[in-house]
Image (cartoon, rainbow, N blue to C red):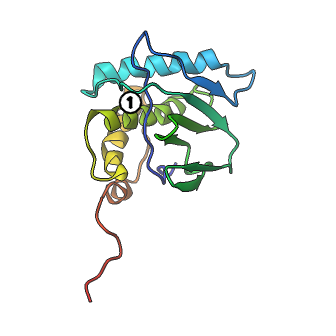
Amino acid sequence: MKPLTTALIALSLTGPAAAEPEIAGTTSYYEPQAILNTMEELNLWLDANTDLPRSDIPLARVELVQPGADIAYEGQTTQIGQTVRGVYDSETATIYLVRQWYGETAFDRSVLLHEMVHHRQASAQHWYCPQAMEWDAYVVQEEYLNDHGETGDFEWAWVLLSSSCAVRDHHPD
């Protein structure tokens, strides 16, 4: 699978007392409570395997959307589907996951985990640009997959380039 092609910003509950996010777009196959349970399992894994603290910002909403849906967030629009499996909108504290997301596979869960890493990063420190968070999020995602006997098979050169804050295609005269 190709890596995500847009900055993904993670989500996290702030702990046991945190308000639960609204869950939208689910089917009878994967109920909202199952998503919340998966999120807490991933939070516990992040607590045990990273130094990133849980975010102080509560997540407002998780929405499963149809493949091909255009998601407007943070002044841009992206289409969710084959390459973009999840998007986090920090302005509305909403995470969007492509509707085939069931959370049953390690890879599905790793997409949500990637989002959660970005959310923790965003509240833990200043970043020069949103894409600078990508490298660490992909590394954590790969570690999670490795712990579950899998790999993301990410294109690490692409991840490195997409994590850069450098001005692209700027050439001196």
Depth order, front residue of 48/16: 16
* Residue at the spot 67% in from the left edge and 22% down from the top edge: 30
Identify the image quadrant of the C terminus.
bottom left
Residue 140: quarter of image: top left
Q: Residue 108 at x, y = what percent? A: 54, 33
Depth order, front residue of 77/148: 77
Depth order, front residue of 135/166: 166
Please determine whether, in this image, residue 146 is positioned above or below residue 72.
Answer: above
* Residue at the spot 72% in from the left edge and 22% down from the top edge: 29
Q: Residue 120 at x, y = what percent? A: 35, 31
* Residue at the spot 65% in from the left edge and 34% down from the top edge: 64
Q: Residue 38 at x, y = what percent? A: 52, 20
In the image: residue 150, left or right of residue 108: left
Is residue 91 visible in the rendered image? The answer is yes
Is residue 100 visible in the rendered image? The answer is no
Circle 1 sits in a helix, a strand or a loop, which is it? helix
In the image: residue 113, left or right of residue 173: right
Total tally of numbered discs in the picture: 1
Mark 1 surroundings: few (<14), some (14-19) or many (≥20) residues within 10 A: many
Q: Residue 43 at x, y = what percent? A: 40, 21
